[in-house]
Image (cartoon, rainbow, N blue to C red):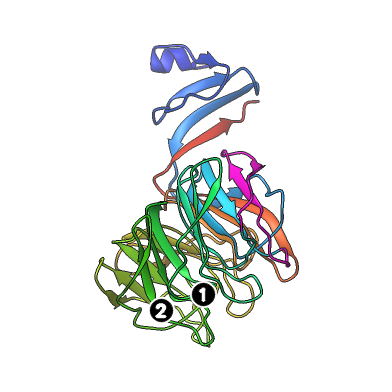
């Protein structure tokens, strides 16, 4: 019988935890979990179960990456100010927002993020900046709104577009770290949409016009351009990624959907579905590794978090031995 040493010329190494950056094809033994593991690359994107939120909710703001994310505000169904941090395994509660609200916009990282707009009993323009330990109230949006699209890199650079203002708006505003400035409007006024990217390179997709839509628009820092629509029109999808490579997941058609689509920069392609159909979930990460956070399963709101591993992403697998 062939042995690993005879084939590879070296022994299987023992570790107390998985290596931080294993090479493709690397094999090791995890002494803590008593498992043999191998590093590979995913060939097909798929969702897996992550750690549950402590507070079930939908319509929250979110930011960060799949191992370092933040979720803030939302509706339980009553509006909440609860903020939680994700470490790749579990969620931990931290300092609350100053203003409880649902349908809030959010961008940035786990240590530098921005919460803006949302709804208390009516749409608000309230803007708060997170520095990793506390929230600071700053200049309000020019147009109060909820359920808008959002994009941005940190608490000094963000974009808010569309949203619920009775009727839905096409208004777009850019944040420079201290104030909001109105810039070119979306081509299609809508609310309940999702966004991805930065304040100068963003993507807006889905929403309600009032009917559900798959309309997708690309932002170049100056203007919006209509591009290929989602294959499944929907409102309240989750979103992650950047302008040229984004992920849309879940939403309502109006029935809840688990459909996931990948944006290539020119068109959307269907991927493997979420495990749980939902609308109003938060999103964080990239097309290689993303999070779908909470949402509404109609009813009820859920704590469920799902982790996306896209095609081409590093993948650590446990080897089954007889």
The x and y percentages for residue 301 are 71, 63
Q: Which residue is mark 1?
A: 145
How crowded pointer 1 is (Cα within 10 Å; few <14, some 14-19, many 20+) is rated as many
Magenta stretch mostly in which secondary structure? loop
Q: Residue 93: in sight, yes or no? A: yes
Q: Secondary structure at mark 2?
A: loop
Tell me the magenta residue range.
76-98
Q: Residue furthest right?
A: 300
Q: Nearer the viewer, residue 146 or 252?
A: 146
Residue 146: x and y in percent read 54, 73
Which of the marked residues, 1 or 2, is nearer the chain's N terminus?
1
Image-based side of 217 in relation to 52, left or right: left
Residue 21, by quadrant, is top left
* Picture residue at 64% right of the left edge, 50% below the top: 96
Q: Which residue is mark 2?
A: 215
> Height in image: 217 above or below 261?
below
Q: At x 61% / y 80%, what residue is drawn?
A: 254
Position above or below: 197 against 147: above
User: Who is closer to the viewer here, 14 or 102?
Assistant: 102
Neighbours of disc 2 within 10 Å: few (<14), some (14-19), many (20+): many
């Amino acid at each position: 019988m062939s042995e690993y040493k005879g084939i590879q010329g070296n022994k299987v190494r023992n570790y107390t935890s998985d290596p931080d950056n294993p090479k493709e094809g690397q094999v090791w033994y995890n002494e803590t979990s008593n498992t043999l593991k191998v590093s590979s690359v995913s060939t097909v994107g798929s969702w897996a179960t992550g750690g549950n939120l402590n507070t079930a909710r939908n319509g929250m703001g979110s930011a960060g990456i799949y191992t370092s994310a933040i979720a803030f505000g939302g509706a339980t169904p009553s509006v909440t100010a609860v903020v939680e941090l994700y470490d790749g395994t579990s969620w931990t509660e931290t300092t609350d927002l100053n203003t409880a609200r649902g349908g809030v916009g959010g961008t940035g990282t786990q240590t530098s993020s921005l919460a803006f707009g949302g709804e208390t009993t009516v749409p608000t323009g309230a803007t708060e900046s997170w520095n990793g330990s506390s929230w600071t109230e700053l200049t309000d949006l020019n147009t109060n709104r909820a359920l808008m699209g959002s994009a941005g890199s940190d608490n000094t650079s963000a974009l808010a577009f569309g949203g619920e203002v009775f009727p839905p708006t096409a208004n777009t505003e850019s944040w420079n770290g201290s104030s909001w400035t109105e810039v070119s409007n979306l081509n299609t006024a809508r609310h309940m949409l999702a966004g991805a990217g930065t304040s100068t390179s963003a993507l807006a997709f889905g929403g309600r016009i009032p009917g559900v839509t798959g309309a997708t628009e690309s932002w170049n820092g100056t203007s919006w351009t209509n591009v290929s629509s989602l294959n499944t029109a929907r409102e309240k999808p989750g979103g992650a990624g950047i302008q040229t490579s984004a992920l849309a997941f879940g939403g309502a058609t109006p029935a809840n959907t688990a459909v996931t689509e990948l944006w290539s920069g020119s068109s959307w392609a269907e991927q493997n579905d979420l495990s749980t159909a939902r609308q109003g979930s938060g999103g964080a990460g990239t097309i290689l590794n993303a999070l779908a956070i909470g949402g509404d399963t109609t009813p009820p709101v859920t704590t469920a978090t799902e982790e996306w591993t896209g095609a081409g992403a590093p993948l650590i697998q446990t080897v089954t031995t007889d």
